[in-house]
Amino acid sequence: MLSMGAAGLALSGCASEQPVGQVGAPIPDDPAYRKLGPRPTYEPSVLAREGATDYSVPSGVIPRRAWATYGPNRRLADPMRRISAVTIHHDGMDAFGSPHYGDAAERLEKIRRSHVGRGWADVGYHFAIDPGGRVWAARPLELQGAHVRDHNEHNIGVLVLGNFERERPSEKALGSLERFVSQLTGKYRLTARQVHTHREWAPTACPGRHLQPFVDRSRMPGGLIAMG
């Protein structure tokens, strides 16, 4: 694992303003952070009274309290409100194949600290999937994410831990990704056309040349995402 000093240099995400094929740069600045002064707190109970979407975490997902040491800062985040898209990412950092729970928790916390260090409300993604196939809760779903510049509204960010320009995702991660995204599309009544990868929104390598083809196949007729 990287030390925190090295992690500060290597931590990335998927940069929408980098040329296709380039990885390792930060994901876009959180559009919710615009020096507009104090913002109201958006709690799930408040949004529910407004008739908003169900933001409950699906069963089987590891809660964020299992890995995050702090946050989120809700004053810096906009509410998600309705949900109309899902976007799949890799983290674009160093290769990561560890199946161990503790290693995944440490990597997620490093990403969160890096994002918060840029003045963001929290880690940019809503969920993360590790090489062992576990699904982790990240940014609370009732808060708008910070994972695709100009397209974060109503858009769930799903991160697969690893750099899939350099390595291939594990079979367990792929299986969990397909099942979990299918679960999300069923819950929010989305079609396969509403499931995207980062590179489909912006010029970036994310989610990597070894993950993009899998997502393409899963969205085709007969694929699990298409059937969600």
Image (spheres, rainbow, N blue to C red):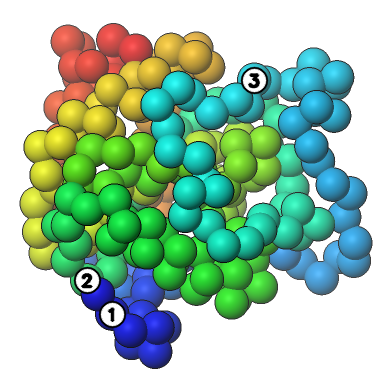
Mark 2 lies on residue: 94
Marks 3 and 1 sit apart, C-alpha to C-alpha, by 37 Å
- In the rendered structure, are the residues bearing label 3 and label 1 in contact, judged by CB atoms less than 8 Å apart? no
Q: Secondary structure at mark 2?
A: loop
Mark 3 lies on residue: 54
Q: Which percent across, then down, holds residue 223?
A: 19, 17
The answer to whether any part of residue 147 appears in the image is no
How packed mark 1 is, by other alpha carbons closer than 10 Å (few <14, some 14-19, many 20 or more), is: some
| 115 sits left or right of 192 in the view | right
Q: Secondary structure at mark 1?
A: loop
Query: Which callout, 3 or 1, points at the residue further toward the start of the chain?
Result: 1
- The residue sitting at 28% across, 10% down in the picture is 227
| 143 sits left or right of 137 in the view | right
- The residue sitting at 78% across, 21% down in the picture is 48
How packed mark 3 is, by other alpha carbons closer than 10 Å (few <14, some 14-19, many 20 or more), is: some
Q: Quadrant of residue 81?
A: top right
> Image quadrant for the N terminus?
bottom left
Mark 1 lies on residue: 2
Marks 2 and 1 sit apart, C-alpha to C-alpha, by 9 Å
The amino acid at mark 1 is: Leu
Q: Which percent across, then down, holds residue 9?
A: 37, 85
Q: Quadrant of residue 43?
A: top right
